C-alpha cells in the first residue's frame, strides 16, 4: 500500500512541476553533453559514444535534469544555471582587459585603471548599445538580416547594407561628417 501511495505522490508532484513551470527551456545540460559528443572524433566514434551514453544513462539523466529542475529554475529566475557568465582576459601591450559575457551582452573592464564599459544587446529592438560613465549610446540596430541602422553624427543615422560595399559607404559617410568625431570620443 505504501508503494502505491509513494507512486501516486511522485506522479502528482511531477505533474505539478511540469504544469506549473510551463516552459520549454533551453535544455542546456543535455545540449552541452550532445555538443561534446559531436566534437569528440569521427562519426563512427561519435555514434559509439552516443549509444554508450544512452546505455550508461548519461543522456537520459541530463535530459531529465533539464526537464525537471534546470528548465524550471531558468523559467522562474530568468537565468539558466548551466549557462553561467563567461570571463576572458585579453592582454595587450599597454593594459589587460577583462571581458565578462552574460545573456544580454558584455562588460569590458580595463584592469589598469578599472574603467568599465558595457555592450548591451536588446533583443526586443534588435539593438546593440554601449554604456560608459552612465551614458548609453546606440551602436547599431538590425533592420533585417541584410541591413543595419548606424549613427553618422549629429543625431543622424543611416541604413547600410551588410556587405563590403555597405561598410565602405558607411566609412565614407563617417569621414564626410565632421560631427562623427564626437562618436569616437565617447
Image: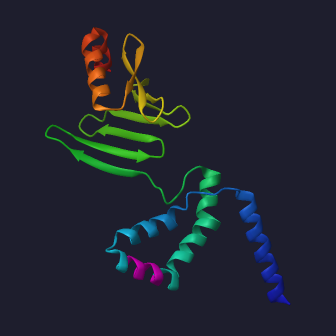
Q: Give the prevailing secondary structure in the magenta stretch.
A: helix
Q: Is residue 78 above or below residue 33?
A: above
- Outermost residue toward the left in this view: 93
Q: In this view, does 112 lie above or below 13?
A: above
Answer left or right for 71 relative to 94. right
- Is residue 48 on the magenta stretch? yes
Q: In which quarter of the image is the N terminus?
A: bottom right
| Residue 53 can be seen, yes or no | yes
Tell me where residue 176 sits by quadrant: top left
Q: In which quarter of the image is the C terminus?
A: top left
Here the colouring is rainbow
| Residue 139 can be seen, yes or no | no
Count all numbered tags in the image, as a single digit: 0
- Residue 37 rendering spot, x and y as whole percentages: 40, 72
Instruction: Please state the extent of the stretch shown in magenta in the rendering.
Output: 46-52
- Outermost residue toward the right in this view: 1
At horizontal 45% and vertical 46% (from top left) the residue drawn is 102
- Residue 101 rendering spot, x and y as whole percentages: 40, 46
Answer left or right for 145 relative to 61. left
- Is residue 163 on the magenta stretch? no
- Residue 137 rendering spot, x and y as whole percentages: 42, 23
At horizontal 40% and vertical 34% (from top left) the residue drawn is 118
Tell me where residue 172 sits by quadrant: top left
- Residue 34 rendering spot, x and y as whole percentages: 45, 69
At horizontal 38% and vertical 39% (from top left) the residue drawn is 107
Between residues 70 and 35, which one lies in front from this camera angle?
Answer: 35
Amino acid at each position: 500500500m505504501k508503494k502505491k501511495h509513494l507512486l501516486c505522490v511522485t506522479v502528482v508532484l511531477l505533474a505539478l512541476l511540469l504544469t506549473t513551470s510551463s516552459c520549454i527551456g533551453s535544455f542546456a545540460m543535455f545540449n552541452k553533453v550532445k555538443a561534446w559528443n559531436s566534437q569528440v572524433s569521427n562519426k563512427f566514434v561519435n555514434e559509439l559514444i552516443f549509444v554508450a551514453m544512452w546505455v550508461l544513462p548519461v543522456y537520459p539523466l541530463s535530459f531529465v535534469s533539464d526537464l525537471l529542475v534546470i528548465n524550471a529554475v531558468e523559467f522562474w529566475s530568468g537565468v539558466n544555471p548551466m549557462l553561467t557568465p563567461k570571463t576572458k582576459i585579453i592582454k595587450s601591450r599597454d593594459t589587460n582587459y577583462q571581458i565578462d559575457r552574460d545573456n544580454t551582452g558584455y562588460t569590458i573592464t580595463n584592469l589598469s585603471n578599472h574603467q568599465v564599459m558595457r555592450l548591451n544587446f536588446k533583443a526586443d529592438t534588435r539593438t546593440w548599445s554601449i554604456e560608459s560613465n552612465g551614458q548609453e549610446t546606440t551602436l547599431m540596430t538590425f533592420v533585417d538580416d541584410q541591413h543595419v541602422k548606424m549613427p553618422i553624427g549629429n543625431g543622424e543615422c543611416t541604413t547600410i547594407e551588410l556587405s563590403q560595399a555597405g561598410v565602405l559607404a558607411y566609412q565614407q559617410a563617417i569621414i564626410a561628417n565632421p560631427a562623427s568625431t564626437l562618436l569616437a570620443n565617447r
